[in-house]
Amino acid sequence: MGTSPESLVTAVAAVDVAGDGVGRIVRPADRLLRPAPGPVLQAEGRSVPRVVEGYVWGAMTSGGWAKATWALLFPFSLANVAHWMLPSIPSGHRAARVLGVVSRSLLRLAALLLTVLLVTQAAVVSLDLLAAQCLAPGTDCLTAVPDWLRRTYPFRQAVGLLPVLLAIFVLHRISSVAWETAAAPNPPAAPPNTKVEFPGRNLVADPDTPALRTLHLVAALATVALLPLGGPFRMPDAVLDRVLWLVALGVLGFALLAVLLLDDPRGAAPERAGRLLRAGLGRVPRALLLAVGTALVVGAGAVTRLPNPLSGAGTTVESLAGALIAVVVLLGLVLVPAALIARRTWSALPRDLRPWAGGWMSVPVLAVAALLGGGFGAGLAITVRKLVGSAEIRLPTGYEQVTLLWGAGAAIGVAVALPALAVAGARLLRRAGYDMVDLLHEDRPADRAVAQRAWRLAGWQRRNLHRVLLAAAGVLSAGAGIAVSMRVAGIDPPGWMAPLSAVGILTLGVLAATLLRAVYTAAQEPSAGRRLGIVADLACFWPREAHPTVPPCYALKVAPELAARAVEHLREPSTRVVLTGHSQGSLLVAVAAGRLLDSLNEPERHRIGIVMTGSQLQWAYARAFPGVVPHGSLGGLAGMLGTRWRSLCRGTDPVGGAVTTWGRQVCDGKLLGTGFRPDGTVGPLPAAVPSPTGALVLGGDHWLPDPMRGPFPGRRWAAGVLGHGNYTSDPEWDRAVALAAGLDPAAPASSGLPWPRGPL
């Protein structure tokens, strides 16, 4: 999120002590910018020396034009995220394994169709709207271009095809960047969508990514080549045109078939066709395929005179959109039995811990990706037509249905949102107060009233985030259903639907303009870049699987380097290491800790601990990604760490929540709940214990009063409701760090512990 090194280590100045400039390990610095020791930790009646280090990965997700333009790939990123949302496959279940293979294949096919659709829509703008129509000789569009230049061959062909080729080249460059590091390798490959012992155990790079990248780009090139030849459904009359048309159609068909057969090699039993494809798509064949695709585009542009307008543009876009919708629907049908089979792995969990949408969440996410991608392409065409200001430019026929789709979606969204918000607001106001607030602010009535309002709002956001996402997908899908039904039935929109098309045009224009403006402001203004970086942090965490043309995954670099740095410190036999992570960092800490516990010996494991603040690990990640961060993997992590896993929580935090406990309730003035016990089992926990700082400690969760108590002389303090930020300012922070280190913050100096005494 653009966090600075100084704020990360809570210091006035910070300096690098390790890293490669992209992943930076920093420490607090003194006035001469030399690494300085951290504040001592008071534990066991003595001062324990402490070294504070921070890992800064902001350079991988924010900063500059290159990373700002990644926002344009957001539909691709959503399609890739949908892969990691697939339900887990119960071990030994043959039908579930087959459904998993089919689901992954359909996701890869949908991702390829999405790439081809967006590139084709970009080609419609440059090749059809601008080159074929706007720059046609004799038109009054862009009058600054002289008529003799319009008639000069191949001026219009170059204007139409060069931007598309440049866009495909940019996609190739973006998808070729990787943040992996050979110095700290990732663990051995694990089968996809299978049960994992620790969080993120199957987060590894897919070796098929280069092959998938080539298939995406070649399919896009072949489709662009078909546009000036009349589209995929009409064979040209000229012999040379016909040869190019047949080759382009064959290349496109090969790419579509290959993504279906090229299953992840970590799967249980890849098909023979997949093995043959993997062997045949080496470096040289991939280069040859890209060369053939580029030659097809150049050849198709050279032999045609660009009719006004292009005859096959509308049918090509419509067929791609229809195929994408069909694949999304088919995936939804396949995931119904897959989710029902996977239900046996989580049916015993409380409702608040079960996967969102019953493990079916990847379908609405993929649907939103498809609709956003198609909408952005149509919005770009509408915006360009408005900018050139010519009434002679005609959009492809199918774009009328796209505007109707978004207009109907906007109308349905408003019709649903207004009463839903009214009901939600009324329920929020009538909701009973949280008893935990009374315990945390027992002697502060003013803070109690403020905290109750913040708890209600934050709790509503955490409980209903997935419902809002499902509602958005449902509204857009309803609009798509109306538009597609009318198009298939050949029904022209009646007059009373004209306002919906107008609303759709306005919505699509605003969508395209807003996204382009976000890219510009993110590259120019640091604050906007940080806001866009939040989205990048979420989307770029996941390795390339379903879609190879997405920004590189930083987790493949951060987690192993973080684990490797911890191993360096553990070489000192008297040193203990506590990994701390805030918000998204808590997921990285969980993945790194799981890899450490999987590789360290038993004595070293007892010198590892973790502290999380504002974490979404339980309420969001375990429910949205049941195959990557299942609830059982959190139990495995808790069983290995015991009391050395601590989490700071605030009920006022709309993003973070509890990590190790659930089912909390107040009974007879005591906070009770269920959670992970120190031995790794699950069950009722002892009543929460008030800490000296005013927090309530239930299991491994430290519930902090917000607003904070104080101010106190000599202590850091922050006023107001802090919500998701500034956890390190709470005095409970040091207590949690001491407990995660295996130290007793309240023990006298004479107490003995089985672990060696030394620095932290």
Image (cartoon, rainbow, N blue to C red):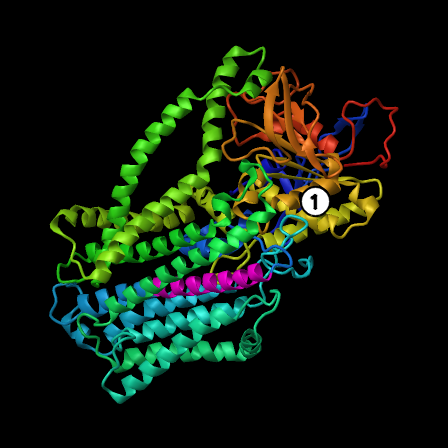
Q: Can residue 587 be spotted in the picture? A: yes
Q: In the displayed structure, would residue 455 be above or below residue 402?
A: above
Question: Where are the magenta residues, as a range?
Answer: 94-119
Was residue 571 drawn as part of the magenta stretch in this picture? no
162 sits left or right of 505 in the view: right
> Where is residue 388 drawn, in percent x and y?
19, 58
Residue 360's place in the image compared with 243, above or below, is above
Say which quarter of the image contains residue 691: top right
* Mark 1 neighbour density, 10 Å: few (under 14) some (14–19) many (20 or more): many
The C terminus sits in image quarter: top right
| Amino acid on which the number 1 mark rests in the picture | Gly
Q: Nearer the viewer, residue 628 or 565?
A: 628
The residue to which callout 1 is attached is 636
- x and y percentages locating residue 471 in the rendered image: 37, 42
Q: Position of residue 745 (x, y in %)?
A: 76, 25
Kindly indicate the quadrant of the structure image that contains residue 623. Answer: top right
Is residue 62 visible in the rendered structure shown here?
Answer: no
